[in-house]
Image (cartoon, coloured by chain):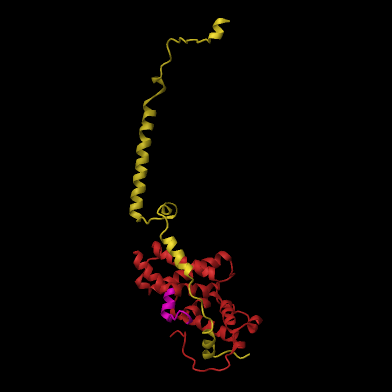
Amino acid sequence: MTDGEFEAIFEEHRQAVYQFAWRMTNSSSSAEDIAQDVFLALFRGDAEPDRSRGSMRALLLGIARHMAWKRWRLDQRWSSLEEEPLPSVSPLVEHLGTEQAVSAAVAALPPLQRETLILATYQGFSLQEIAETLGVEVGTVKARLHRARENLKRLLAPHRPGSMRSVTEYGTAK
Amino acid sequence: MEPLNDRELDELLKQWPAPLAPETLAKRIGRRQRGPWWRWLLTGSIRVPVPLALALGGALMLLFIGVRGPAKNFARQSPPSVFQPVKRLEPRIIRSSYEANH
């Protein structure tokens, strides 16, 4: 990969990679570190673009996800990566502003649900793209996304929008 | 409390914007990308195809055996009988001038 090709990829995807890492970690410094590692891995050739595995963005976010998980494992933040235990409703969410409440509720999701929801809602990935990025079946993605949304519906119930004007189909994976 | 419906949830999820990537990210990438050439000697890595790595390993092993081989032969061909005892020992005693005068 030439310097020019690398710079074009960086310019095109840096926001997506950084914002994905930011939402996954809830930390600006961690997101910056992860984004840096993702692009340097690409530059060094540690991550060869594989057209059969989807788009460049899917490849980069797949690396970002891997690096975020590595950090979490090092921090031992999760005793279990499985998605079965449902998050409990935090009373704090009720007293937060809407933005902080959404952030806290997404952070409270089990990690497999969280990454699926972020890819679907904020990266606009299709179920197929998510499946390719995560290396799982489409049916698994559907199930995780459904559970994530059901959990959020319950967690964020205290923040029910007052009026529902012109709601678009924003962020819903087709 | 009654859970949200899909539309209400989507409305709320829209209200969690992520910040833009900081400019420092580009600087960090650029700095690492264009680091000094000698850094590669410390941190760089190269990819070597397995057949080539095996061939190089074999060549190194042969070279090692080749270097060590003659030494073994020399040891085998040089029995202790080659070393003859000194027939006539005439040590030369050197005295200091102080010793000679006193």
Queried whether the magenta region covers residue B96, the answer comes back as no
Q: Residue B82, image x and y in percent?
A: 38, 20
| Residue A134 in view | no
* Residue A111 image-quadrant placement: bottom right
Q: In this orientation, which residue lies closer to the viewer: A115 or A37?
A: A37
Q: Is residue B81 above or below residue B67?
A: above
* Residue A136 image-quadrant placement: bottom left
Q: Residue A40, image x and y in percent?
A: 43, 64
Range of residues picked out in magenta: A121-135
Give the main secondary structure of the magenta stretch: helix
* Residue B64 image-quadrant placement: top left
Which corner quadrant holds the C terminus of chain A? bottom left
- Residue A75 located left or right of residue A19: right
- Residue B44 located left or right of residue A157: left
Q: Colour of chain A?
A: red
Q: Is residue A7 above or below residue B59?
A: below
Q: Colour of chain B?
A: yellow
Q: Residue B23, image x and y in percent?
A: 47, 69
Which corner quadrant holds the N terminus of chain A? bottom left
